[in-house]
């Protein structure tokens, strides 16, 4: 089976699509726009999910689950929210099928729902209808809930992991007694996402806020983390929203204060999805396949035996078992691949494609010399090292690989933030270099829209680290007091 990939330099989009399929991460399904996540891809998602879930619980959140279906009337209660999602909603209108006179399965036209149900594109409306029953007084606050779920946003142009009609995600929804508490929560969760993406995915991010036109539908402020892919396009890796009292007022969620008055609660929501797997692939991988950071690799070490006789295999297996036991004791995931249906060369190529961080190979001579051959996936380098102290050396090396992958991505990102002062420079950087373009903007949605129409670049964020400086808008020449980051994006 050929594993040759299109080179990134030739066709980055084709390379990505081929890699997702050939590395057994996911495939298109029989349902248009929806994907099947295969076991190896799902194993990466499980690692992400486990770590994020731990971080959410460490910050005081609990998991719950809310319905997949949302009555249409709920959406109409928050005007900007329904406007933001109206074009993406899948709608359930009937509840029964029947067989017609030709024996065909058809929708039973007599089984029409009294009120249509929306397949959730996000759960604010159903959750805030529920919170009305849960929140009575200040003693019930803060309410810090997360759910792991699937959502549906009807997409016309789809790409595995990056944009599919159905995807997996988590969505946090919190209620607070004061505006300040809610803002602190939204900023805290932006920090949690940044921590996860940088320290586990090894992807550097820029923390910032969205412009008004790029905010989540119904939000007063959207906090985001933006990452840069190898092709110079940006990708939003997580968002956290300060919703003010918009949803509390729409669903009449009030609480009795300590003083006895009735107040509307303050809200946040925040989420990250399987799109993160797309980010992981596009940040680190190369023309040979996946490169996975050790912290999220389903298999961190693979051991491949090289032998000619059954006797040699038995001796190697005994040593491999001993090494595996030591590695697992250190919390390292290891696979011993002694399948006799594939040759070592085929296995090497397979694990290279799948991005396993470290590969050990052991042959009869290695047993005699008490050595192993160690190959690094990220650098494609090999060395022969002693078996003594091997487990601790591997533990140290995995930590080193994690850091070096981050540093490599950080260097690329920093080299692709370009300051410009004219629109000609702006267009030239986008066309020839890509990455983030740091430019002055006059603060108007009209200018933002014109730039987007002309260049396909959007304002990715107003960085938290922005320094206020007098300047002129790169497009209109109007006064501006800060730079923002533009980029083409996924």
Image: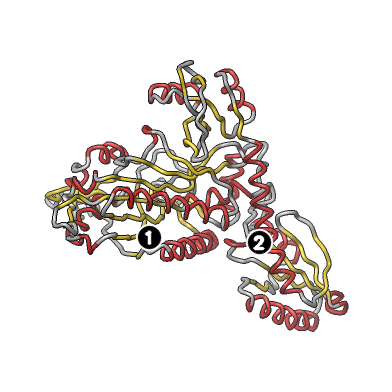
Label pair 2/1, CB-CB below 8 angstroms: no
Front-most of 424 and 3?
424
Determine the secondary structure under disc 1: strand
Residue 84 location (% of width, % of height) = 30, 38
Residue 429 location (% of width, % of height) = 61, 26
Residue 153 location (% of width, % of height) = 35, 45
Front-most of 35 and 440?
440
Residue 276 location (% of width, % of height) = 50, 51
Closer to the chain start, of discs 2 and 1, is: 1
Residue in view at x 46 percent, y 26 percent: 452
Residue in view at x 57 percent, y 58 percent: 200
Can residue 96 be seen here? The reply is no
Residue in view at x 51 percent, y 51 percent: 194
What residue is shown with label 2? 356
Q: Quadrant of the N terminus?
A: bottom right
Coloring scheme of the render? secondary structure
What residue is shown with label 1? 148
Q: CA distance from mark 2 to mark 1?
A: 27 Å
């Amino acid at each position: 089976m050929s594993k040759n990939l299109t080179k990134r330099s030739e066709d980055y989009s084709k390379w990505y699509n081929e890699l997702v399929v050939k590395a057994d991460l996911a495939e298109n399904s029989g349902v248009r726009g929806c994907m099947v996540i295969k076991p190896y891809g799902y194993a990466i998602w499980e690692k992400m999910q486990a770590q994020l879930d731990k971080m959410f619980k460490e910050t005081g959140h609990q998991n719950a689950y809310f319905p997949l279906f949302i009555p249409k009337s709920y959406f109409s209660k928050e005007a900007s929210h329904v406007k933001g999602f109206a074009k993406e909603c899948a709608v359930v209108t009937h509840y029964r099928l029947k067989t017609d006179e030709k024996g065909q399965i058809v929708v039973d036209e007599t089984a029409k729902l009294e009120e249509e149900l929306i397949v959730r594109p996000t759960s604010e409306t159903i959750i805030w209808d529920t919170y009305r029953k849960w929140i009575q007084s200040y003693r019930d606050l803060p309410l810090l809930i997360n759910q792991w779920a699937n959502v549906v946003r009807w997409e016309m142009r789809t790409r595995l992991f990056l944009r599919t009609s159905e995807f997996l995600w988590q969505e946090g929804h919190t209620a607070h007694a004061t505006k300040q508490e809610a803002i602190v929560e939204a900023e805290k969760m932006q920090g949690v996402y940044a921590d996860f993406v940088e320290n586990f995915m090894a992807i550097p991010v820029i923390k910032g806020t969205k412009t008004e036109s790029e905010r989540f539908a119904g939000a007063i402020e959207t906090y985001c983390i933006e990452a840069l892919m190898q092709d110079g396009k940006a990708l939003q890796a997580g968002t956290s929203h300060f919703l003010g009292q918009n949803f509390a007022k729409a669903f009449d969620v009030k609480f009795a204060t300590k003083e006895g008055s009735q107040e509307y609660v303050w809200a946040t929501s925040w989420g990250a999805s399987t799109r993160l797997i797309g980010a992981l692939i596009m940040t680190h991988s190369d023309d040979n396949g996946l490169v996975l950071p050790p912290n999220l690799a389903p298999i961190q070490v693979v051991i491949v035996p090289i032998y000619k006789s059954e006797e040699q295999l038995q001796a190697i297996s005994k040593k491999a078992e001993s090494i595996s036991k030591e590695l697992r004791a250190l919390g390292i995931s290891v696979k011993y691949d002694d399948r006799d249906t594939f040759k070592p060369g085929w296995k090497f190529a397979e694990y290279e494609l799948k991005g396993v961080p470290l590969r050990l190979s052991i042959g009869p001579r290695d047993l005699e010399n008490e050595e192993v051959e160690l190959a690094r996936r990220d650098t494609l380098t090999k060395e022969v090292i002693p078996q003594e102290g091997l487990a601790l050396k591997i533990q140290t090396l995995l930590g080193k690989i994690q850091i070096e992958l981050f540093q490599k991505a950080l260097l690329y990102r920093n080299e692709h933030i370009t300051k410009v002062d004219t629109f000609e420079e702006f267009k030239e950087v986008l066309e020839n270099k890509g990455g983030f373009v740091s430019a002055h903007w006059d603060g108007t949605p009209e200018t933002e829209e014109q730039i987007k129409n002309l260049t396909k670049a959007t304002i990715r964020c107003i960085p938290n680290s922005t320094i206020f400086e007098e300047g002129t808008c790169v497009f209109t020449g109007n006064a501006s007091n800060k730079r923002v980051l533009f980029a083409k994006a996924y």
